[in-house]
Image: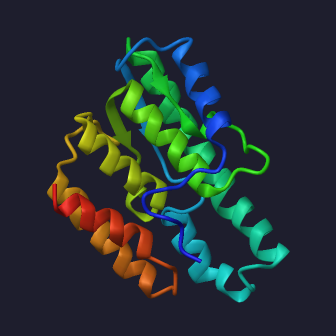
Amino acid sequence: MTASFPPRPGRVAEIELAVNAIASTVDGRVALYVSTPITTGPRFVTWLRDRGSSFPRTSAAYRDGHVAAVVRPNIAAAAPIVRDLRARMRQPVIDPTAFPDAPGWAQDDYRELWTRVIQRFATRVLFIDGWEYSEGCCLEYLVAFRSGATCVDSREHPLPRDQALERMSRACAELATLDVDRAFVRQVRDTLATL
């Protein structure tokens, strides 16, 4: 089943509570938001190609392997980047990897939360390498671009729309070779192309 586009959250009150918690420390559009793949990215492509495809995608072995080989390493890789940014920046740095798994939340709930956070608080969004493989990061690029936030890559160089579109297209082509549903990213890319 493909996730909805745009996202349709089910946990609206909880999402609003989380946004308001951020508002208790971040006043206005002054933050740097760090967009990073958590469940996907280049590690996911490598894992799926090397080992993940040997398990049924609904199996416990697949889920456990995915967490061990993709999710935990992605979160660990983002940590030093966030620490460095916080040490150098005067502006607040919002790290979505620090948000714990919320019981009962679907992917669309997380997408809605981070969409609202970017729109309300982010003046800049930094995209960690490999972001184009992530449905969430691609949506975050679209939201950041639409809202007028500055989009930059891991080296803090500008990440213009045309370059983002090219990266999304390349990622979709690679994911197609692994039989990964690309409909959501294609919808994001197609919407971004019209802006």
Residue 36: x %, y % from top left: 48, 47
136 vs 171, nearest the viewer: 136
What residue occupies the far right of the structure in this picture? 60
| Rendering quarter of residue 90 | top left
In which quadrant of the rendered image does the C terminus lie? bottom left
Q: Residue at x 39, y 54 (%)?
A: 139
Q: How many circles with numbers are drawn on the protein?
A: 0
Residue drawn at the location 49% of the way across and 62% of the way down: 41
**Observer able to see residue 129:** no
In the rendered image, the vertical position of residue 144 relative to residue 25, given as above or below: below
Horizontal side of 160 relative to 190 (left or right) equals: left
Res. 42 visible in picture: yes
Residue 29's place in the image compared with 75, above or below, is above
Residue in the picture at 57% in, 21% down: 20
Question: In the figure, residue 19 lies in which quadrant?
Answer: top right
Is residue 174 or residue 190 the one in the foreground?
A: 190
| Residue 21: % across, % down | 61, 20
Quadrant position of the N terminus in the picture = bottom right
